Image: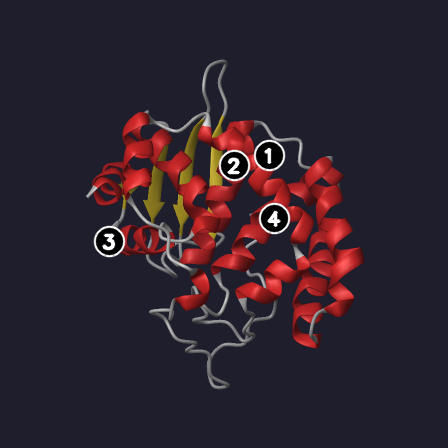
């Protein structure tokens, strides 16, 4: 009930039901738990809200994280034109970056490129293609190291959210969590030894108690509720990642 109540409370525009279901679903996986715990904690402080629009009604990006900076604590508005787990995870990752004031262009970016250099060539061709598209093509359009690192941080989490075991729907390509883990060895360790510790310091007491009582599920033993619905007749995805915010 905690997730339902807080997401509903935070939704200023639109219907929260799909977002509630996706957040509850993602919450069972270790990869996303701390991001969602921070989200729930900030909602309790009335510093994060959702605006959820029906697809096609508003001319905007699929998702945007608006950060309202002040001399005190930041406030965030997560705007969703299309609601699914990987877009939600992407935008909440931008919130995490801003809330923790992370300097991602330093250690995080180094860890990602270290993983690419050391591990990518041992991956299968599909994994090389997908990650190569992100790292060497799409991210390069961002003009500064800071903006590239910020986008890469969000896409790192997004990749895991549209993995075959989590939410493969709408994707032309399927990629397994274990394949991602084999590539992102150093990055995953950075998340565990640095990022997660930073987040845990900011978790609300009630949220922490709820998290402690909620068991993780082994992502490799979960059958996604959403099968891959992509078909040749549906709209082709021009870019592996559709939203640039």
Badge 2 marks a residue whose secondary structure is helix
What residue lies at 37% left-to-right and 33% top-to-bottom?
Answer: 48
Q: Which residue is mark 1?
A: 194
Q: Which residue is mark 4?
A: 188
- Frontmost residue, 126 versus 200: 200
Instruction: State the separation of the CA atoms marked 3 and 2.
Output: 28 Å
Q: Which residue is mark 2?
A: 196
- Frontmost residue, 58 versus 189: 189
Q: Residue 122 vs residue 30: left or right?
A: right
Q: Residue 90 vs residue 125: left or right?
A: left
Tell me which corner region of the image, top left, top right, bottom left or bottom right, holds residue 205. Answer: top left
Find residue 52 and report its horizontal and vertical position in percent. Answer: 33, 49
Badge 4 marks a residue whose secondary structure is helix
Badge 1 marks a residue whose secondary structure is helix
Instruction: State the separation of the CA atoms marked 2 and 4.
Output: 10 Å
Q: First in sequence: mark 4 or mark 1?
A: 4
On screen, 76 above or below 240?
above
Instruction: State the separation of the CA atoms marked 3 and 4.
Output: 31 Å
Q: Which residue is mark 3?
A: 17
Q: Is residue 151 visible?
A: no
Instruction: State the separation of the CA atoms marked 1 and 3.
Output: 33 Å
In contact (CB < 8 Å): disc 2 and disc 1: yes
Q: First in sequence: mark 2 or mark 4?
A: 4
Find residue 186 and report its horizontal and vertical position in percent. Answer: 68, 48
Circle 1 crowding by C-alpha within 10 Å: few under 14, some 14–19, many from 20: few
What residue lies at 62% left-to-right and 45% top-to-bottom?
Answer: 189
What residue lies at 40% left-to-right and 42% top-to-bottom?
Answer: 36
**In what quadrant of the picture does the N terminus appear?**
top left
């Amino acid at each position: 009930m905690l997730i339902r109540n807080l997401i509903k409370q935070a939704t200023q525009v639109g219907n929260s039901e799909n977002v509630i279901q996706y957040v509850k679903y993602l919450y069972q996986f270790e990869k996303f738990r701390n991001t969602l715990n921070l989200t729930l904690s900030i909602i309790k402080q009335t510093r994060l809200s959702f605006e959820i629009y029906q697809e096609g009604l508003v001319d905007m990006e699929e998702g945007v994280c608006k950060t309202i900076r002040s001399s005190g604590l930041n406030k965030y508005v997560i705007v969703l034109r299309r609601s699914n787990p990987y877009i939600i995870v992407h935008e909440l990752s931008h919130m995490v970056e801003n809330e923790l004031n992370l300097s991602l262009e330093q250690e995080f970016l180094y860890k990602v490129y270290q993983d690419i250099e050391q591990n990518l060539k041992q991956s299968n061709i599909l994994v090389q293609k997908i990650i190569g598209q992100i790292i060497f093509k799409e991210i390069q359009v961002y003009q500064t190291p800071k903006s590239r690192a910020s986008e890469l941080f969000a896409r790192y989490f997004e990749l895991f959210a549209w993995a075959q075991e989590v939410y493969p729907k709408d994707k032309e390509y399927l990629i397994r969590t274990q394949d991602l883990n084999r590539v992102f060895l150093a990055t995953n360790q950075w998340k565990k030894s640095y990022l997660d510790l930073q987040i845990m310091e900011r978790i609300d007491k009630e949220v922490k108690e709820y998290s402690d009582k909620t068991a993780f599920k082994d992502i490799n033993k979960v059958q996604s509720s959403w099968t891959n619905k992509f078909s040749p007749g549906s709209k082709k995805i021009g870019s592996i990642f559709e939203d640039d915010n």
